[in-house]
Image: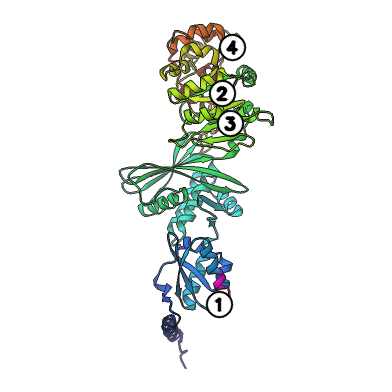
Amino acid sequence: MDLPFDTSKTDAQLAEVRGREEEDVVRILSEKYGMHYVDLALHEIDTEALRAVPEEDAHKAEAAVFARANKTLSLAVHNPNNRALPGLLHDLENRGYAVKQFLVSHKSLEKALDRYGDLSYATESKPGTFEVKGDTLARLTDETRSRTRLRQALDAMVAEKALDRVSRIFEIVLAGAFALGASDIHVEPEEEKARLRLRLDGVLTDAYFFDPKTYHLLNSRVKLLSGVKLNVSDRAQDGRFTVSKGDRPVELRASFIPGAYGESIVLRILDPEATKTSFKDLGIPPKLLARLEKEIRKPNGMLLTTGPTGSGKTTTLYSFLRELESPDIKIITIENPIEYHLEGIVQTQVDGKNYTFSEGLKSIVRQDPDIIMVGEIRDADTADIAIQAALTGHLVFSTLHTNDAAGTFPRLADLGADPKSFGSAITVAMAQRLVRRLHPDHRKERPLEDDEKAMIRKVFEGFPDASLIPQDPQTVWEPNPANEEDTGYAGRIGLYEAIFMDDELANFLRDNPPAADIRKATMRQGFLTMAQDGIVKALAGLTSLKEVADTVGLPDA
């Protein structure tokens, strides 16, 4: 019986010989054409460099970019006589690129062209922009709707050896952050790994751990997108870039600070949808909301909102501006930086040197605005000019860093503002915090403990408006998570308090009293404090007592 003859080994040997012969021929032709020669089988293809030439143009010209150094491109050319090649070269030169041509074999060119398939997920259309195709984003978002599914997706991609895996990993991180409603993305290098954390409803949560090599590649990718220096790692840097999320852009602010094991990266997600919330939907108590609706429509004065970073101050002020924006009103802002772009409003940004808050405010006043928003009052000059603007026919909105509404006035005095001007300039001093909102389907009602009842009575002791005091509460709501990943919370809601200027308060402030005395003197106005607002919301099932206690503090019984 004749045994079948196995030709696979012989065929492979012949293919290898033919391949070597082709490379030899191309090497000889390169000398004829006066071109460099390269065998791309021995080189990695830089997939980011491929983006310089659209795939269709690369196929027509039989040429592909395989490496890039700043504005110098290495172009693999298979047929120097291709009619489409001169047009491709001319286009690259017009875009400011210096092109170094290399003659390559058909096999080498196919290797480069095959790498275009790795770009099907993400395309970088311009510096500072990371574009994810709509269908890809929708799929990834659906695949990463829980932290477990996000980890599984990242495990699968980290294990891949594709050259563009870092771009795909970053896509998955972004899609997961969008799907889970994260406000920030944190990447923190440690001794043997890098921790990925997402801020969900104001609370940081571990999401994944990267190996050091993937972290460094991810660091470079984010730096490149953010427009910061790749070779600087010993000082803080800030940048920003835009992600195309479906049919709308979402801006990300990037911060890099040096650490013991590498740079800590924080990406703050600035989704413009956040600014479309009406101030009536922020959770402001009804009595306070009715008064604020009148105050923000006054022709002059100053409304200050206070609280720590991340307490929603800017969102509140933006919601006021959106409510007031109209063709017959001139609104100008000075911010650091501009977080969201608002239609119909002139927005300017400080640069830290020539255009500071104080210098910019002086210029803005000369532009004859009706309403001015100052991103933050942080020094004596800005405080003084803002007060003068409020005294001369402008409505001024701004933010300040204090613990509560009563602390607004001592803080301004510490900055050098004259307390005697407060009564004429300042109309409203607000304070706010954000607490997690209970998921309506993942909460449960329980009886109040005796010490909790005593604490509630203490918080409302002496409060003048009896209609706002909870009457003999017996139950309170708390989270009831559906699974290990669930927290029982979904989204956030604000806690608010405010002090309104009147003649009695104006006279009282002239002697620059401490915040505790201001707090007692303004209780008569009958507006809830943040602690009282939090208790009312907890009793109504909007948040929990623990969340209120952790955010604004509650006294012992």
Magenta-highlighted residues: 83-87
Query: Overall secondary structure of the magenta stretch?
Result: helix
Q: Which of the two labelled residues, at mark 3 and mark 2, occupies the earlier sequence position? A: 3
Q: Which callout, 4 or 3, points to the residue nearer the camera? A: 3
Q: Residue at x 54, y 79 (%)?
A: 81
Q: Secondary structure at mark 1?
A: loop
Q: Secondary structure at mark 4?
A: loop
Kindly report the distance in space between the C-alpha atoms of the residues bearing marks 3 and 1. 56 Å
Q: Give the residue at mark 3.
A: 332
Q: Residue furthest right?
A: 327
- Which disc is residue 396 wearing? 2
Q: Amino acid at mark 4?
A: Gln
Q: Residue at x 58, y 36 (%)?
A: 274
Q: Give the residue at mark 1.
A: 82
Rate crowding at label 3 as few (under 14), some (14 to 19) or many (20 or more) other CA atoms within 10 Å. many
**Residue 511: quarter of image:** top left
Q: Which of the two labelled residues, at mark 4 and mark 2, occupies the earlier sequence position? A: 2
Look at the numbered discs 1 and 4 and tell me whether their residues touch, using CB distance below 8 Å. Answer: no
Q: Which callout, 3 or 1, points to the residue nearer the camera? A: 3
Q: Which of the two labelled residues, at mark 3 and mark 1, occupies the earlier sequence position? A: 1
Q: Give the residue at mark 4.
A: 471
Q: Amino acid at mark 3?
A: Ile
Kindly report the distance in space between the C-alpha atoms of the residues bearing marks 4 and 2. 39 Å
Q: Residue at x 56, y 44 (%)?
A: 250
- Which disc is residue 539 wearing? none
Q: Amino acid at mark 1?
A: Asn
Rate crowding at label 4 as few (under 14), some (14 to 19) or many (20 or more) other CA atoms within 10 Å. few
Q: Which of the two labelled residues, at mark 1 and mark 4, occupies the earlier sequence position? A: 1
Name the foreground residue: 278 vs 383. Answer: 383
List x then y, in percent, for residue 161.
43, 62
Q: Secondary structure at mark 2?
A: strand
| Number of numbered discs on residues | 4
